Amino acid sequence: MTHPSLHRQGDGRSQQPLLKDEGRGRLPNIFPPGDEGGQGIRPSASRRSTFRSRTPDYDAKNSTKRKYIYAAGFLVLSLISFTVQTETAVYIQHELQWDKPYCMLYFTHSSWILLWPVQLLILRIQKRKLTWKAFWRRHIDLLRITAQMVETQDLYLTSRDYGKSPVLYMFRTTAFLTSALTVAGGSWYVAVNMTTASDLTAIYNCSAFFAYVFSIFLLREKIRLDKVLSVVVAIVGVIVVAYGGSHSSGSTDKSSQAASETGSRTMGNIIIGIGSILYGLYEVLYKRYACPPEGSSPGRSVIFANTVGSMIGAFTLLVLWIPLPIFHILGVEEFRWPTGEAGWLLIISILANATFSGSFLVLMSLTSPVLSSVAALLTIFLVAIVDWGLTGNPLSAASITGGFIIIAAFLLLSWSTYCELDEERRHRLLDEEPESESDE
């Protein structure tokens, strides 16, 4: 079936989408060919030449490779930014004595609101030849149609889906995800003074295991032996790092002794265990309810992931300030603005967290919650190396061994995920053509 051109020559605007199959009432994407993120312009003739020169298998295979290239870039960015955030946060709390857990959680998560404006600026620079009106309309259309894809979990929209606003769905999803994330993240701050650092690290990072369990039920992932083995090996690596070294640090010894003396270690472990489960659930819920369906192009996934991150930041900023005055009045956590060195280091920590969070959301959108969780474990080894450089304390044999175990688990899981994506690509080709980058 031949499509009329979806692009008006000369005025930089696309017409309303036409029915791909009038019998079913399904709609194709409205953006013109060659349109990265639904922003550019290319003559309609290029779509015909693209169909002649490229097969669906070629587009799908390139899309899988492009996903991994994007994911690799955002993985590196997330590792660097997380290390910066961790080192500055520890210094602010321990050395500068600005120990305000919930306040720091509120500031860092609120900073996610910056993701969409920064992304919009980058896209605008890339597409500066477009008029602002045309650029803005195309960007909003991309977000609206992607949100409708997310709600229906279908690359192709029916006429009924296209006419339904996705605003209410995205508001509910944002509120739900933000609440789960805040409770999961807050559990870490609650348990940090109740249990030992080793217990905290080992139990909280078991979220990778829970992410896989929830993926089986909510994302209908198949139980694969190589994936199970990768997750188990990664958790073993974390346990080796957490318990295998000799804790010579006086602060660590004191925290362990205090936890044992007060009898709070068990309660702290229960709290951090609940947080670990909730964080694994949050990752899977994000993938299930806030990511475009499989077959979406990498560019679309990146743009929408950062937009969802900004929505989470906006909800945190506008709603989750409410506990701050309550905690202050009850004496749970006295509110005090950071000043001097603590102030500017907190800004660096907040910006690093926003960068890490945006990169991590993109990583989950492009790959899977399980791979992203195991990738996050790489930060344990990276932070240990940076600590070695800053403090001069050499890495223990357990830290080195555990670090290499985690790296091996990540590489094994990456290969398994790539093979799984390739299998899905071949199966999907039997049903329908995936969305190519040129279809955005």
Image (tube, rainbow, N blue to C red):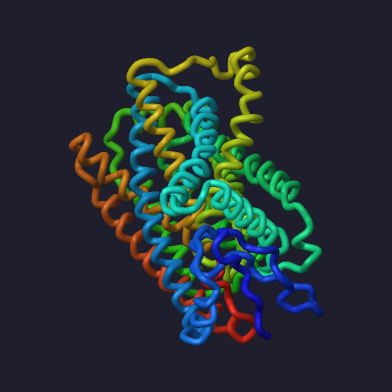
Up/down of 168 relative to 45, above or below: above
Instruction: Find residue 413 and report its horizontal and vertical position in percent.
Output: 43, 68
Frontmost residue, 388 versus 132: 132
Horizontally, residue 266 falls left or right of residue 30, namely left
- Coordinates of residue 182 in the picture (x, y in percent): 59, 38
Whether 227 is drawn above or below 143: the answer is below
Q: Is residue 140 above or below residue 35?
A: above
Residue 197 visible from this viewpoint? yes
* Residue 252, percent from left and from top: 35, 32
Quarter in which the C terminus is drawn? bottom right
Q: Please state if 137 lies on the left or on the right of 237 as rendered.
A: right
Q: Which residue is at a point 66% across and 63% down the rendered structure image?
A: 15
Left or right of 398, for residue 254? right
Pick the quarter of the image with the N terminus. bottom right
Q: Residue at x 37, y 58 (%)?
A: 73
Where residue 364 appears, as percent x and y from the top left, is: 52, 57
Q: Residue furthest front?
A: 10
